[in-house]
Image (cartoon, rainbow, N blue to C red):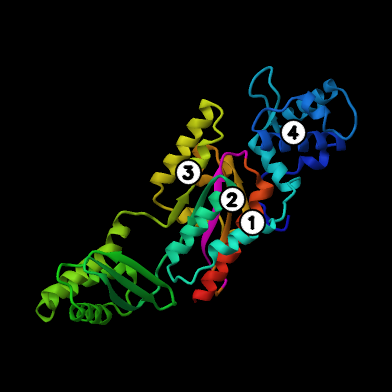
Amino acid sequence: MKWITRVSDQVSHPLDNLNARSREVFRLLVESYLESGEPVGSRTLTRSLSEKVSAATIRNVMQDLEHLGLLDSPHVSAGRIPTHMGLRLFVDGLLEVGNLSTDERRSIDASMHSNSEDLTGALDRAGSLLSGLTHSASVVLAPKTEAPIKHIEFVSLSPDKALVVLVMADGQVENRIFTPPIGQTPSAMREAANFLNAVLAGHTVSDLKSVVETEITRRRQELDTLAQKLIEAGVAVWAEEKSGTPDRLIVRGRSNLLEDTATEADLDRIKSLFDDLERKQDIAQFLDLTEQGDGVRIFIGSENKLFSLSGSSLVVSPYMNADRKVIGAVGVIGPTRLNYGRIVPIVDYTAQLVSRMMSNRN
């Protein structure tokens, strides 16, 4: 339980008011539901309960739990499923968090180990890793690049391909491949890099396009035509990313969410979640979810303000820089029937490795 930070104290702990039998029935029912996704009936529970009691007795217990708001009946003749309040109670008081297996730990270590300085690529690998291990969708919030630009350089890869590299004052390195103007020369690349290093010192990536456009207009006579085109092509790579808002939210594994859609209602919820993920503009809220406490946080249904319409669950943990400042987050999102006990340590360990990577970069 050391990984979990409780979301709120809005839900009191009626577990304290339940007798041992009611607690066990509730725990077994939720665990069965999380494993199968199906309503759980009294006969199923009689086979797992530690004491031998009749199905009728268990049905009475289930009715009491339903009156408390912890269980719900999707159909008149069906078994029960936990409500969002019931899941919250289970997560806060009864969830048994497992440990990472050796294979899982090795897989995470191998995926995150790279000599590349490309931050976006590293975070993308983290997202793919999370979605693969949990068979759900992953969400990764990349840190906002606000450090001043320290150095910029152009590298020719081929006649029709070049690399523009940005080094930030905080040590972060970003690079993008782009198509240079026809006839590029080493001297044009040096001239373009010298010009950008002179005018961009102290500015951030957010300022990049406007500063360069102003300076090119003002100093056009000083620049070779080929160098001008090279500068414009290289800067456009970042400008297009900013204007297109491929914001800082990296989502991987959406298709995993479609595998367990048993009903049309499930499919509608997943479609709603997809819409949320596609159109989300202000992802600063996502980071807000993690800043109220250390460790992994679990948001269930309406507690998750960012994706509340889809009734989804979000298991998320912040990652930090060398100054122990929260700068981003990694997590898993999916239906409320997530395997929380297994997902929590996976998210936690991944966040730790990303934090370590960010600290090493600094």
Q: Position of residue 93 (x, y in %)?
A: 75, 46
Q: What residue would you read off at disc 3? A: 254
CA gap between label 2 and label 4 equals 25 Å
Q: Nearer the viewer, mark 4 or mark 1?
A: 1
Report which quarter residue 303 is drawn in.
Answer: top right
Mark 2 or mark 4, earlier in chain: 4
- Residue appearing at x 44%, y 77% in the figure: 171
- Residue appearing at x 76%, y 45% in the figure: 94
Q: What residue would you read off at disc 4? A: 29
- The local secondary structure at tag 1 comes to helix
Q: Which mark is residue 181?
A: none
Q: Is residue 30 above or below residue 102?
A: above
- The local secondary structure at tag 2 comes to helix
Q: Nearer the viewer, mark 3 or mark 2?
A: 2
| Residue 9 visible (yes or no) | no
- Residue appearing at x 63%, y 58% in the figure: 348
Observer-nearest of 112 and 308: 112
Q: What residue would you read off at disc 1? A: 104
What's the residue type where badge 4 is placed? Leu
How many residues crowd around disc 4 within 10 Å: few (fewer than 14), some, or many (20 or more)? many
Query: What is the magenta range?
Result: 324-337
- Verify CB contact (< 8 Å) between mark 2 and mark 1: yes
Furthest-right residue in view? 52
Q: Nearer the viewer, mark 3 or mark 1?
A: 1
